[in-house]
Image: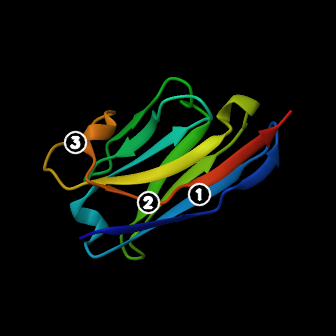
Amino acid sequence: QVHLVESGGGLVQAGGSLRLSCTASGRALSTLVMGWFRQAPGKEREFVVRISRNDVTLYSDSVKGRFTISKDNAKNTAYLQMDSLKPEDTAVYYCAADRSFGLGGDNAAEYDYWGQGTQVTVSS
């Protein structure tokens, strides 16, 4: 069983930055595909980015060039650096882990484990 804990959310003005962290326990991060999703009020959960075991990344068009995913296998932690934040980035952000052997995708159904979520609010 993999347990994921996110941190780093908060309130920031438009144009600002935040860094989210997702620490995994129960399995080495190097054996997992890690993804970030978000869900705004009244909307469905949306794919943001994922990083494969060998560090291949896939970003949604809405965050490409502004968000950066990374991971530190020694700390068993994945990060989401969010720059140039916009009000439309406001959502609960979830990290997720996929234990399969592929690169990982953008479908939430592919992910086996989820964190509890952290709120990101961007004011205009």
* Residue annotated with mark 3: 103
- Closer to us: mark 3 or mark 1? 1
Q: Residue furthest left?
A: 101
Residue 96: percent from left, percent from top: 37, 52
Secondary structure, mark 1, is strand
Looking at the picture, does residue 13 appear above or below residue 97? Answer: above
Q: Residues within 10 Å of mark 1 (few under 14, many from 20)?
A: many
- Closer to us: mark 1 or mark 2? 2
Q: Residues within 10 Å of mark 3 (few under 14, many from 20)?
A: some
Residue 14: percent from left, percent from top: 82, 37
Residue type at tag 2: Gly
In the displayed structure image, the side of residue 22 where residue 14 appears, left or right: right
Taking the spot 48% from the left edge, 49% from the top edge, the residue there is 69
* Residue annotated with mark 1: 20
Decide if residue 26 is in sight here. Answer: yes
* Residue annotated with mark 2: 115
The mark that comes first in sequence, 2 or 3, is 3
The mark that comes first in sequence, 3 or 1, is 1
Looking at the picture, does residue 58 appear above or below residue 79? Answer: above
Taking the spot 66% from the left edge, 35% from the top edge, the residue there is 89
Residue type at tag 1: Leu
Secondary structure, mark 3, is loop
